Structure formats: C-alpha cells, structure tokens
Image: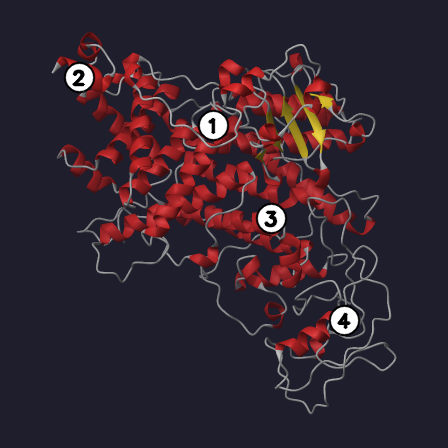
Amino acid sequence: MERLLVSLTNSSIKELESHDFKYDIPSAASPPAPSDSSSDDDEDDVDDFDPTADIQQRLTNLDIKDYDSIKYTGHSAGLQLVDHDVFKSKPYIRWPGRDNVVLQMMGQDELMIVHTGKPDTRLDVGLSMRSTIFDSDEHRSHQSASPTANKRPSKLLSDKMIGLYFTHLHPFLPIINKTRFLDQYYGSHAPQVLVQAVLALAFRFSDQHFKEKHASEYSELYFRKVMKRLRDSLRSRLCHVQAALLMTLYLDMDDGDVESVQWFTLGTAIRMAQDLGLHRSCVHWKLPPSEIETRHRVFYACYVLDRWMGARAGKPLTILDRDFDTAMPSIYEVTDTSPGTTGEPIYRHFTLLIKLSEILGRVLKALYMPKAKHSNSNAGLDDPTIRVVFDRRLKNWKASLDDENAAIPPTQKGHLLVFYYTIVLLLHRPFVQLSTTQFPDLQSIVADSREACTEAANAISNILRHHSSIPTAEYSHLSLCLPTCFVYAMFQSSLVHLSNAIQDRASPHKLQTLQQTMSLLKLHEHLCPAPRAIEILQMLITINNLECSQDSITTPTQLPPPLPSHTPIPSAKPPTSSTDEEYPKSNHLFERMLNCSVVGGITPDIRHDVESAISQQPSNCFLPQPETSQLSMNYHYHHQQQSLRNHDYSFPLTLATPHAPLPPPAPLQHQPYVMAHQPLAFIPPHPPPSHQQPFTAPPTTSAAGWHEWNVYIEHQNPVIDNTSGLHIPPQS
C-alpha cells in the first residue's frame, strides 16, 4: 500500500503524513501540460536575452514570439497626452527612470510600450493603469500559496467572514440570495463552490482592510479551489455564474498580473449566464419568486461589471442592450413568502447603478468604439447631438439620485456620484482634445466640455477626500468593493488636470491642482492599481516638461471649489413618471429625424431641453476617429433653404407619387468624395430645384426594389454607404 501511494503521488510517506495525506500539495503537483503556443514562456526564450545589447538593438531584434503576446488597451482607459512631435526626431523615447521600457508611436496614433528586460519582452498598446509591464520581475511573478494555505480556517472564523461579506460587499452587488444562502450555509447544504467563492472574497477583503491573520493564505487557497471548479465544470449552473462574478471582484483586489485573467473570468460568467437564459425575463416563468429575483440580480451584476471593466480596460462590451429583456431587480429583499414590494429599500443603490451603467455603455459605444462614427452617421447623429442627449440623460439620472424620496446612505451616494462624474469625464473628454485653432467653429463646445471635465474632476476629488477623512467601516464599502474603478476615477480626474496644465503652462493654479489630485492618489496607494496610475502620470508630466517634482506631491490639502458653470445647456428637471428603461414611441418630428436607440431614447422629460440645446449648436460635425487627426466636420446641407418642417417625414418613406421609369445612373461629374472638404448631401424625398445639376431622380414607385434605391443613394453619395438616415439641418 505504501509503495502504491508513493508511486501515485510521487511523494514520500512522511510528506503525505505532514499534509494529512492530501495529494494536491505543491511537491506532488503534476507538471504543466505542454503548450502549442509560441509564447514567451518557453524555456528557449530566456536564453535569447542579451543583457549587453543596447535598447536600440533589442528593439531591432523583436520577432514573432515577442509580437505573440501584444496586449491592447482602448482609448477609454486614458487620455493620449504624448506629443507626436517628440517621435519625429527619434524612433522611441525612454520611460523616465527605466532603462528597459520605451515608448513608440505606431500608426493610427496608437502608443506602444515595450519592455525589453529579462526574462521576457512585453508589448502593450495603450496606457493601462493595471498593466504590469513596468513592474519589476519579482513583482510580476505570482507567488504560490504557502504551506499555511493548506490548513483550513476554523468554523468560527469562516462564519465571521460570511458575516463580513454580507455586511460590506453584498450591498454593492447583491449577487447571492442572502436569505437562501444563509439557510443553506448553516444547514451545511450550500453549494460548495459558492461557499468557497464567498470565503475567498471575504478573506481577500479582510486581508486588505482589517489585516486578519493568515487571511491572504486562506483567500489564495479558496481562490484556487474555485477557479479549478470553474475550469473543470462541463455544464453551466447559476452557482457557477455567481462564483465567477465573485472571483472577478476578488481579482479586482489583486495587484499582480491578473487583468487578463479577470477579463476571461467575467467573460465566462457572462457566457454561462446567457447559456442559462438569464438575459431573458422570467417574471412569468413558473419559478419561486426568490429564484426569479436572484436570476435578475445575477444578470445585472454581469451587466454592470461588463460596462465598468470595459471602460477601465478599454475593451469592447460583451452584453448589448438589444440582446436582453431581463426585468429590473427589486429594491427590496425578496423571499418566497414576501412579494418584495415592502420593507426597507436596501437595494436602491444597485438599481441606480444599473441605470447609470446603461448610460455608460451607450457613451462607450457612441464615442469610443472603432466604427462609432459610421454608425452614428447612419443613425442621423453627429457628435455634438450625442453630447447634448447624454448630458441631459446624466443630469436626469442625478436628479433622481437627489430626490428626497429616494434617500440612500451617504456612503452609497458618494459611491454613485464618483461613478457619475467618471461618465461625465468620458462623455466630454473627446471634445477637450480638439484644437480650437484648427476648428474655430467648435470653440464654444470645446470650452464647455473642458469646463464640464474640470468640474467633474474636482467633484471626484472632493468626494473621495471627504470620505477618506472619515475612516469608518462604511468607507471600506465605498473604496474596496471595486478598487480599480475608484482608482480609475481618480486617474481620469488627474488626466483632466494634467491636460489643463499642458494647455495653460503659465498657470500655477492648474499645476497646483494637478499636484493635489496626485496627492489624493498617493493617499490611496493601498488600492492595488494606484501606484501604477501614479507612475503613468509622472511619466506624462516628465515627457511634457511640466515642473511638478516628487516632493510637491504630498498629503492633499483643500481643493479649490468646482468652477461655476456657464454652459448653455439648461439645468436638470426633476424626473417624471417615465422610466429610464422604457422609451415610448412617438410621432414627434424630432424623434423621427434620429435613430434614438443609439443614445438610449429621448424621453418626454428631456426632449425639450435636447431640442433647445441642439438649436444652439454652431454646426453639425463629427469628431475625429481615434486613428486620425482629421476632423470630419461642417456637414452642411446642400438645401439649407429647405426646412424639414415643410415636409412630413416618416420611416419608411412612402413612394406613392406618379412615377416615371427609373433612369440609368449618370456618370459622376465631380471628384471623389473627400470628407474633410466636401459636404454630405442631404437626400430629400422630392426632387430639388432644376438649377441643381447633375441630379439623379430618386425612384418614385412603390414597386422599386432595394437595388434601385441603392443605385440612387450611391450616386448621390459615392463613398458613404447606407446614408438614408436623415440629419438635423442647421437651425435658421
């Protein structure tokens, strides 16, 4: 028997006895399976490193193995504040203070960070505050669990951690049915993977906030067990979705090289949720009320994390708003004996976060996705219009937060306001980057957006400084439930102040404000991504030659109050009975000119303000694509003398007038369409005046096919496809 045990476990009897005959000890671990990937983890990759080679030689010697692991971070993760002129005289610039990290400017205005040190070469496209590319090799290596981790915590300590989870973490994202889970846990029949996931997250939280003895080892133990169960499962289960979401929160508190693992884990949770049908409303299914509510909450937890992880990492969204009809969860605790319509509204914070996350997702898709401009143009939306609509929707959401009948605890309100002002920054940030010298027509929009960004950045700093000055147990709920997103908010606010300081180098006030926001970041260095965010900011300060020394970044003092707003957009009105998730259809002319699904709908309570603000726009324009410095703007219409109000437009266009045979398309009489110089033609439903030549008459028969309409549209606009959407003409 002893020989059999030794042969099966590859360990001695003494080693087995010391570990209570557990075979999954480190010394008995099986070797990793061979990989077919040409990654930089192969043994021969380490031998290729030449410490005597200079940085230029190392960059020249990059090969396919180095490019195999390029990591991409999108534009929502941070501002591009590196002057392109710096790269005109040299192919790269060094990361300040690091000899083995350089910056290179690629095509499409993408910044690449190259780490050429031992043991591997790493390439990052875009600046991410979670990137470990400039960490030391020792810091980047993930330490294995210590022998203490093989010992399980006592039942008393586990019970304490379960209580800690429901006190501090559960209100943020109510992933678990509290009543059912506690009954199952104390009855010893709760799903094991779910219990282990709760304990892993609670021990991780306790280690960072309460410094519980051995909490780090216990959290690592349970984390590995949960991830193994998720990896080995062959069938989706609701408890597996919940466990994957809890592990996503766990990895958000980890300061190692875990960003990709976190992204994969969240994606696994979303795919399993869709496999289980959580994206469909089950209100009328024959399920217990508590089960229906749990399914709704779990799906919206996936939805919220998908949006905030995507914004912070610059990644595409996984859940599209058109792909689900799950009902909003209740703000009350729901049990099988309670309908969930009375009691204390303990989950109002969660429902407000869901509605705010919906706006965030639409902002990301409308302003930061690679093909956003093309989609917006087809929908009849230009960028200033999108800015106005989202600005009104955000202010409408904030009015609901300030409603006296919707009172929530101050800490939770501060948490929501930090997220709110972060979205304000993301909304206005693309406009701030425009040059008013190059685009004088947009000067008022750029000034308004810069002011809005500055106010939002100051508000974030003021909120976090206020809560950090009150070190209560509730504050941990504010800062540690999703720490990377709170550091992301501070990082974005610091980038705004850095942009202001670069724009006005002669202003000592703007430089001082930048130093104060960076001091606030240093105050939160216990949150895992904060040190990297500080290093990125210091790199940008050095490259842009700003006088901001390390000694000047100290404990934050009183920040200046937010600047008074002079934006022409009217103030928010109290919300009406219309809900954010239901947008009634209307025959109103304004709504029929726009594809309102892009912005999430224009409800009656904001329609008047949106129309009023749009009428004050200088012109219809589109912001530059992320990959180009040219602005596709001044889309003035050829027929300004014609007003849309003279016609009754509706979709689809009716073709009931007398008709003549469709003429063949005439040869083009003008140069190819150049977006920066030639306006986009407005396609009227009736023939234009005879003096406008050349002109191909539109099909006027109800029997005309799609091909005939495509021929007509392509002749009017030879480059742009699918331009049948109507645009708002300039107001007279």
Label 2 vs label 1, nearer the camera: 2
In front here: 558 or 530?
A: 530
Q: Point out residue 434 in the picture as x, y percentages from the top left corner.
A: 75, 43
Q: CA distance from mark 1 to mark 3?
A: 34 Å
Residue under label 4, please give it.
Answer: 716
Q: Point out residue 57 in the picture as x, y percentages from the top left corner.
A: 71, 19
Residue under label 3, please give it.
Answer: 369
Mark 2 or mark 1: whose residue is earlier in sequence: 2
Q: CA distance from mark 4 to mark 1?
A: 58 Å
SS category of the residue bearing label 4: helix
Label 1 vs label 3, nearer the camera: 3
Q: Quadrant of residue 535?
A: top right
Residue at 25% x, 34% y is 193
The quarter of the picture where the N terminus appears is top left
Label 4 vs label 1, nearer the camera: 4
Question: Is any atom of residue 218 visible in this view?
Answer: yes
Residue under label 1, please give it.
Answer: 467
Amino acid at circle 2: Leu
Mark 2 or mark 3: whose residue is earlier in sequence: 2
Amino acid at circle 1: His
Residue at 43% x, 25% y is 254
